[in-house]
Amino acid sequence: MQHTGGPGWRITMDTSGPMLIALYIRDVSGLDGAGFPALSHAAPKVRHADHSHLTAEVGGISALKTEWEAWWEQLVKAHPQMSPEMSPPGFRSFANSPALRRVLQAHFGAALTWARERRKEYAELEAERVAGGSAHLLEDIVEDRLLEVGRNSRDFDLTIIELPLDEQRAWFLEPDKIIMSHDLLSQPEVFRSYVQPVVEILV
């Protein structure tokens, strides 16, 4: 986790274990384009499995998509808190999402392993950023904007959620969150092109 801030403002960059698991479940279920925003596929790629037999009695793939989207919306809103709780093997928090619950029961072990591997990679990436100085880019973007407007910043908190996505871009979720590919910061100009307009709104 990286915190950057000044008088009245703070930007936090981190990944999310629950959202990593949700991404795995989305991709293993073949729910392309599900959720808001419709994020690109996870990287490394998660192999799609057929779940028609698992979900046939509980609404099929359309129910799974609806339930996954509701779960994703909860995760985005609750971040950095974990809500709803994922508690195998029963996943009681998902009692009202029977299709999703079945898929979670089938794939939770693999999803957890995949998410842990991605978190480990993210920790290594963070260490590289600190060593290389790229962690200061956010501060530079805010300071440039403050010089431009000639005043102190308005109070704001911005949360950047970094996820392993195969598309190098970011998605702004009003009013105070950005989801982005965790490789984006390695491309400073592209990173700036996504973050600067948001900072201009908030500062």
Image: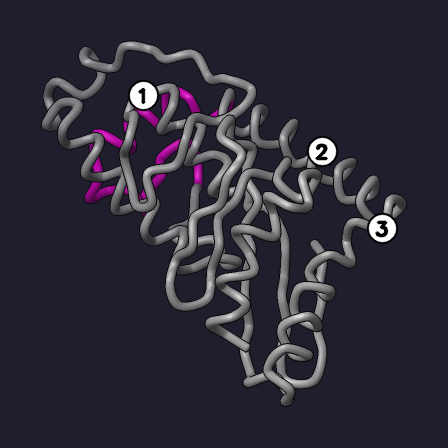
3 and 2 marks in contact (CB < 8 Å)? no
Query: What amino acid is at disc 3?
Result: Gly
Q: Which residue is mark 1?
A: 29
* Prevailing secondary structure of the magenta residues: helix
Is 26 located above or below residue 159 in the figure? above
Instruction: Report how far apart the C-alphas of labels 1 and 2 lie in the structure.
Output: 24 Å
Q: Please tell me which of labels 1 and 2 falls first in the chain.
A: 1
Label 1 sits on a secondary structure element that is: loop
* Relative image position of residue 121 (x, y in whole percent): 71, 31
* Relative image position of residue 9 (x, y in whole percent): 62, 78
Residue at image location 46% in from the left, 72% down from the top: 201
Is 56 located above or below residue 96 in the figure? above
Choose top left, top right, bottom left or bottom right for residue 43: top right
Residue at image location 41% in from the left, 30% down from the top: 40
Q: Magenta part of the protein: which range?
A: 87-109
Label 3 sits on a secondary structure element that is: loop
Query: What amino acid is at disc 2?
Result: Lys
Residue 120 disc label: 2
Is 176 located above or below residue 22 in the figure? below
Q: Please tell me which of labels 3 and 2 falls first in the chain.
A: 2
